[in-house]
Image: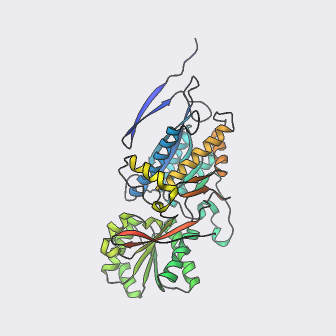
């Protein structure tokens, strides 16, 4: 008697909509066979902080990736393939990220992963994914060493992991961009530089410092802080006595907000400046609107609200009923997810409309050559897996909210 595949209808409530996904027996190529010629289900994994202090950014990433998956399914963008999203919470912890990477690798239906948010988490995941030939595309990692190797700053660039890609540009550009704006446009000359000792924060502060000194700016003090303490009174006193007119903070908004608040309360007349991890309404809330006024954050890309390419994304995100804002990385998360979808499409179309054997490796290979017009502009990757979109924007807190004041595009 011939065995018949069992058709299972699974329901998932996402953004208020009910989605039916057809699944069946797992095949040996990656993906689930739904039998009787019904196609396959391909899982796109996602790793981000979905709870904890950075969850505002993580949930914006998750929702935007979910929207990309729903859009692909609605359009039947890859014939015979239904996509689903498997989102895991890393709480911004490298150990959790590594566990999540192992879990995603174990699921043979996963053919690509979006995330993570934090560069330090990415460091813990890269080898796990690369050993499995499973592609990851981060919408938010900015530390250059993730793609260009530990010696990138000396000019020796070497791609360590072929499966690693990102749609956000790197701190090799972001740090100098901030230094140039602060020195040339904001006319600040004396910087106190602080970082949180993490991969992202320390790296970003380092690239800012290098460019600042090149421009002729003076570093009047440096400090490393534990972002978990939230008591920055000692460093606030040092900042005030240093005579600094600007504080550059390499770190994330959960610590940056209280830090800025305490520095201003200590009587220091400074502007607090940071990178993309400060570009969130949460920073203003934590610092207080009055203390945050005039503070500056750089972030990847152009303001998404100004991009014609983002109009459909913005409308669909609103229509999707997501409770949380898309935040700084929403457009990049959508584009990261869509890059994986495009790579799956290339792999399927190159194999007579079916998932090929060794699908993960084929998807990773296809991802290197992906090129499309995305939410954030042209999406493609260079020889290191880095985005070819090098645009950055300066945002300033005005009237209790970040407003864009300058955008530019750079080459490394």
Question: At x 59% / y 35%, what residue is drawn?
Answer: 79
Q: Quadrant of the C terminus?
A: bottom right
Taking 13 as reference, is 309 left or right?
right
Q: Where is residue 23 shown, x and y percent of the image? A: 50, 30
- Extreme residue in the front direction: 308
Q: How is the image coloured?
A: rainbow
Q: Nearer the viewer, residue 106 or 324?
A: 324
In the picture shown, does residue 153 fall above or below 191? Answer: above
Q: Nearer the viewer, residue 256 or 13?
A: 13
Q: Quadrant of the N terminus?
A: top right
Residue 290 position by quadrant: bottom left
Question: At x 56% / y 75%, what residue is drawn?
Answer: 176
In the picture shown, does residue 249 fall above or below 32? Answer: below
Q: Where is residue 178 shown, x and y percent of the image? A: 51, 75
Residue 362 position by quadrant: top right
Question: At x 65% / y 53%, what residue is drawn?
Answer: 162
């Amino acid at each position: 008697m011939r065995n018949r595949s069992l058709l299972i209808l699974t329901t998932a409530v996402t953004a208020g909509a009910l989605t039916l996904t057809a699944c069946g027996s797992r095949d040996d190529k990656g993906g689930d066979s739904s039998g009787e010629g019904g196609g396959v289900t391909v899982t796109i994994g996602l790793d981000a902080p979905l709870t904890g202090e950075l969850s505002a950014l993580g949930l914006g990433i998750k929702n935007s990736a979910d929207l990309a998956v729903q859009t692909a399914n609605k359009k039947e963008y890859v014939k015979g393939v239904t996509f689903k999203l498997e989102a895991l919470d890393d709480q911004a912890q490298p150990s959790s990220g590594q566990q999540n990477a192992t879990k995603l690798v174990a699921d043979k239906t996963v053919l690509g992963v979006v995330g993570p948010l934090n560069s330090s988490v990415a460091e813990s995941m890269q080898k796990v994914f690369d050993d499995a030939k499973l592609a990851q595309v981060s919408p938010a990692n900015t530390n250059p060493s993730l793609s260009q190797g530990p010696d990138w700053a000396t000019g020796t660039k070497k791609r360590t992991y072929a499966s690693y890609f990102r749609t956000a540009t790197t701190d090799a550009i972001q740090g100098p961009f901030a230094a140039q704006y602060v020195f040339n446009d904001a006319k600040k000359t004396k910087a106190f530089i602080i970082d949180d000792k993490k991969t992202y924060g320390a790296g970003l502060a380092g690239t800012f410092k290098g460019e600042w000194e090149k421009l002729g700016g003076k570093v009047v003090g440096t400090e490393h802080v534990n972002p978990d303490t939230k008591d920055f009174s000692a460093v606030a006193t040092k900042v005030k006595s240093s005579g600094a007119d600007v504080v550059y903070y390499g770190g994330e908004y959960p610590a940056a907000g209280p830090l800025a608040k305490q520095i201003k309360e200590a009587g220091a007349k400074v502007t607090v400046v940071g990178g993309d991890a400060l570009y969130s309404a949460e920073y203003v809330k934590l610092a207080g609107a009055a203390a945050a006024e005039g503070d500056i954050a750089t972030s990847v890309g152009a303001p998404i609200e100004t991009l014609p390419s983002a109009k459909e994304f913005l409308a669909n995100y609103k229509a999707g009923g997501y409770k949380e804002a898309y935040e700084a990385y929403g457009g990049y998360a959508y584009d990261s997810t869509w890059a994986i979808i495009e790579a799956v499409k290339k792999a399927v179309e190159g194999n007579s409309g079916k998932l090929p054997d060794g699908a993960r490796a084929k998807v990773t290979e296809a991802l290197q050559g992906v090129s499309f017009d995305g939410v954030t502009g042209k999406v493609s990757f260079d020889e290191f897996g880095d985005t070819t979109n090098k645009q950055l924007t300066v945002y300033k807190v005005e009237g209790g909210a970040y407003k864009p004041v300058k955008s530019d595009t750079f080459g490394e």
